[in-house]
Amino acid sequence: MNIPLRTHGNKTKSGQKWAKFTYVGKETKFITKLFKNSSVNVSYTTHNAISKLLSHRPTTNQNKFDSSGVYHLTCPDCKMKYVGQTGRSCCTRFHEHIRDFKYANQKSKFAQHLLENNRSICPIDNIMEVLHHTKKGKLMDTLERFHI
């Protein structure tokens, strides 16, 4: 197993050196115990920090609405935002919101807002923004809650 080791040239006031390990599990703890009786202090880092998991990842798709993910819809008149998620394409989900608006269904909260406030509807490019492209699951649920 390859565990990256970076030693920093900066010394503390007491003259101690620091070694920084990328934490990968119990193996990292085992290796860092070797430094316990040395003059080297140990610190840990990780690759899956919450900021990296929740940050926006640009899409590589030709059409940004062709994949699943977390999105928001913006009311064209009052700028109210609705955050949602879909395991299907965002384009498919947008058309469901439009259908609910057109037929006055109460299934979509966004369509309900438009109907109750006599708002207009606009094309997908003007209303929908895909916040994260991801597959259905716990990460998608977490991303949706984060944006709400």
Image (cartoon, rainbow, N blue to C red):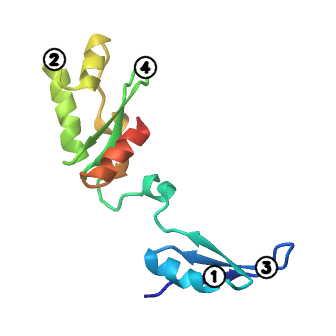
Indicate which disc, 1 or 4, sits on the residue closer to the N terminus. Answer: 1
- What label does residue 28 carry, if any? none
Q: Amino acid at mark 1?
A: Arg
The residue closer to the viewer here, 35 or 84, is: 35
Rendered image quadrant of residue 106? top left
Amino acid type at mark 2: Ala
- The quadrant of the picture occupied by the C terminus is top left
User: Whole-percent x and y of residue 127?
Assistant: 35, 33
Q: Position of residue 79 (x, y in %)?
A: 43, 24
Q: Find the distance from the CA under tag 2 to the CA under tag 4.
A: 20 Å
Residue tagged 4: 78
- The reply to whether residue 28 is in sight is yes
Which residue does the numbered mark 3 point to in the structure image?
16
| Residue, disc 2 | 104
Q: Secondary structure at mark 1?
A: strand
Secondary structure of the residue carrying tag 4 is: loop
In the rendered structure, find residue 6 and report the number of the disc placed on it.
1
Q: CA distance from mark 1 to mark 2?
A: 61 Å
Toward the right, the furthest residue is: 13
Q: Nearer the viewer, mark 1 or mark 4?
A: 1
